[in-house]
Image (cartoon, helix red, strand yellow):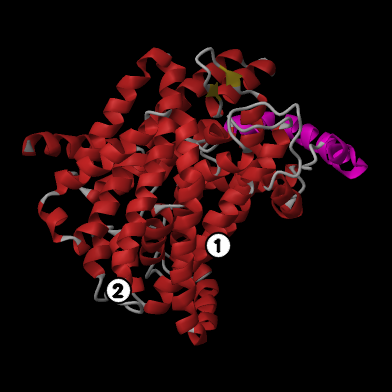
Amino acid sequence: MGEFFSSINAILETMLFFDILFGTVDGVSLPFLVIWLITGGVYLTFVTKFINLRSFKHSYDIIRGKYRTIDDEGQISPFASLTTALSATVGLGNIAGVALAVSIGGPGATFWMIVAGFLGMSLKFTEVTLSIQYREFLKDGTVMGGAMEYLSKGLASKGHVSLGKILAILFAFLMIGGAIGGGNIFQVSQAYSAISHEVPYFADNPLVFGFTLATLAGLVIIGGIKRISTITEGLVPTMVVIYLSASVWILGSHYDKIDDAFALIFSEAFNTSAVYGGIFGALVQGFQRAVFSSEAGIGSSPVAHAPALTKYPVRQGMVALYEPFIDTVVICTMTALVIIITGVFEPEGAYATLIVAKEGAALTSAAYGTVISWFPTVLSLSIFLFAFSTMISWSYYGERAWVYLFGSKFSILYKILFLSLSVIATVVSTGIMVDFSFMLMLAMALPNILGLFILSGDVRKQLDVYMTKLKSGELDDEAIRDE
């Protein structure tokens, strides 16, 4: 058994040769894919005329059901799609990822995470709009959407049939890998790291923990997107409230340090000191962890939005704007403030071993525990729920990619593979899993953003038409009124 796990680690280490795309993860170089994500976010922000800032109220009205129509098509409500997508993003990226970003890239990484969050809103709007536009209702009653569909069909409509097909297939393989790595193995390993500190039994019996989590996930994912969305509608708001309540309590207890923390964040964001890799070190860590947290630009959450009940693709795109805002701008920032204020991020401090081992979840637990002695136990439960919710959403993402490549009748093979690796994740090297997860997920941005560039003009036209109808009152006239 030990030789088997050693072989897995050797394979993963070999796969980290993609330096041409990823640069030095923990160093000062600027990986190409980070540049690619920044470029895509800035470009689409201008193409959509800063949709990430000007449609907040209307987006909220859509979420609360004000603009439902009799012509809406889909399987689940816009809010259910949002919570399903958030269940994949609001999770260990907020807990473990932020801790790693601050400890490796310094406090300045927080600033770049916030910037990435706002740019991510434009990316998310564009990719979700395209996902609805090109979604397909399959004979088995499920919906096929996401980057696979708009890359193949959208680029074909522009005369790039072969390119679209190649990019769609490449994306599907990367998303399966991302689901297995970042959406599964990383989640389980980080959750196990945090919980094993609180429950000694699991520290001695890691496979029991993996089997327990895999069993719970299996009971949900077997029911498809409707069961997943039902669970996430109740689970996500509960998780967010618990986590944010603790964060607010800690920040309130140290309110006198908040100004200094923000000052440190802004000064370190542009600091040329080599301690954390300088400006590039902060920027790279900020964007990498923000992308891993919000998934904006990598094309994953459009799969969750594809089944949404809606008449206009742009409308669901506006709902998706809230994902990076809630996930990155709000939750990640609050986590970073707690970590900075408590000082656990110092590379030469008492928690240096956790930083070296990249046990971000345990590091965040330690930060909260310095103020609320009993909170690590609650946080361990939260981490378990975060990992669980992310797993069930990412299992769906990977399953849709699997179905795109191999057909619906083979989806059961993917589910067996996914759940089996959940068990194995408790005994595979955590550090390698972190790098492997980021590598696969960031790589999804390569074909996805290329497609967004090519199809952005169509999204702009749809948005202009929609905003004209909104201003004229036409959208209000066609909305269903609750009696």
Quadrant, the C terminus: top right
Query: Callout 2: 10 Å neighbours few (<14), some, many (20+)?
Result: few
Q: Is residue 43 visible?
A: no
Magenta stretch: dominant SS? helix
Q: Distance of mark 1 from mark 2, alpha carbons?
A: 24 Å
Quadrant, the N terminus: top left
Q: Which residue is mark 2?
A: 374
Direction from residue 13 to residue 441 in the image, left or right: right
Up/down of 210 relative to 342, above or below: above
**Is 283 included in the stretch rendered in magenta?**
no
Direction from residue 131 to residue 57 in the image, left or right: right
Query: Callout 1: 10 Å neighbours few (<14), some, many (20+)?
Result: some
Q: Which residue is mark 1?
A: 330
**Is 454 included in the stretch rendered in magenta?**
yes
Q: Residue at the spot x=52%, y=30% of the render?
A: 447
Q: Residue furthest front?
A: 483
Image quadrant where residue 278 sits: bottom left
Image quadrant where residue 36 sits: top right
Amino acid type of the residue that numbered disc 2 sits on in the rendered structure: Trp
Q: Which residues are magenta?
A: 450-478
x then y, percent, for residue 451: 60, 29
Secondary structure at numbered mark 1: helix
Pair 1/2: label in front: 2
Up/down of 133 relative to 139, above or below: below
x then y, percent, for residue 272: 47, 70
Please state which of residues 330 and 97 is positioned toward the viewer in this rendering: 330
Q: Dots 1 and 2: beta carbons under 8 Å? A: no
Q: Is residue 200 visible?
A: yes
Q: Residue at the spot x=36%, y=42% of the render?
A: 182
Amino acid type of the residue that numbered disc 1 sits on in the rendered structure: Val
